[in-house]
Image (cartoon, grey):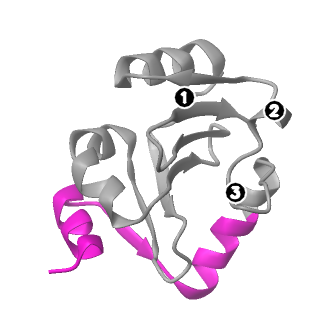
Amino acid sequence: MSLINECIEALGEDVHVFSDNNREEILRKFESYFPFSEWGRIEWENVSNHAEVNTVDEIISFLHQNTEEYSDIVYIIWDEGSLPIIRSTLDKVFKVIDDVTPVSFDTWMFSPYAGYVIEIFHDGEVRVGLK
């Protein structure tokens, strides 16, 4: 079984997999919310409200303190362009994070509904930021 299939299976019910046009639409929105470097990393110096975090509790605390309407619905996006985008809940993603992050080098959890992103960079650095 491939890593992406293991990830989808681990996330369980209510997971939606996007490919083709829907995937491109989500990526356009993601890229319009956050500035990216030419090497594919969010340019955090151009995101006014962000933090480097080390735990799930720090992520949740940041989101609750800084978003007016917290949303648990996220799109999981990887740096590998051939992979689909998956919609799930942040709670489910955190429960199976060891099945989510190995799919590709860099992983983002993007909520267009609340305007936040969590970036898990391949060097282990984790940042959360708001649009």
Mark 2 neighbour density, 10 Å: few (under 14) some (14–19) many (20 or more): few
Measure the C-alpha gap from mark 2 to mark 1: 23 Å
Q: Is residue 29 left or right of residue 124?
A: right
Mark with earlier residue (3, 1): 3
Q: Is residue 27 magenta?
A: yes
- Mark 3 or mark 2, which is nearer the start of the sequence? 3
In the orientation shown, which residue stands out farthest toward the front?
A: 123
Category of crowding for the residue at label 3, using alpha-carbon neighbours closer than 10 angstroms: few (below 14), some (14–19), many (at least 20): many
Q: What distance separates the C-alpha of mark 3 from that of mark 1?
A: 17 Å
Could you tell whether 30 is left or right of 46 in the image? left
Residue type indicated by callout 3: Phe
Q: Label 2 belongs to which residue?
A: 45
Secondary structure, magenta segment, majority class = helix
Disc number for residue 30: 3
Does 45 appear above or below 105?
above
Q: Residue at x 79, y 62 (%)?
A: 38
Amino acid type shown at disc 1: Tyr
Q: Are marks 2 and 3 in contact (CB under 8 Å)?
A: no
Give the residue pinned by disc 1.
70
- Where in the figure is residue 76, as x and y percent of width and height? 46, 57
Left or right, residue 53 beside residue 117 = left
Per the rendered image, the range of residues in magenta is 1-28
Q: Quadrant location of residue 131?
A: top right
Eyeballing the image, is 46 above or below 60?
below
Question: What is the x, y in percent for residue 111?
Answer: 58, 46
**Front one among 43 and 96:** 43
What SS does tag 1 mark? loop
Q: How many marks?
A: 3
**Numbered mark located on residue 23 in the image:** none
Residue 121 x/y as whole percent: 51, 46
Query: Residue at position x 76%, y 59% from top?
Result: 31
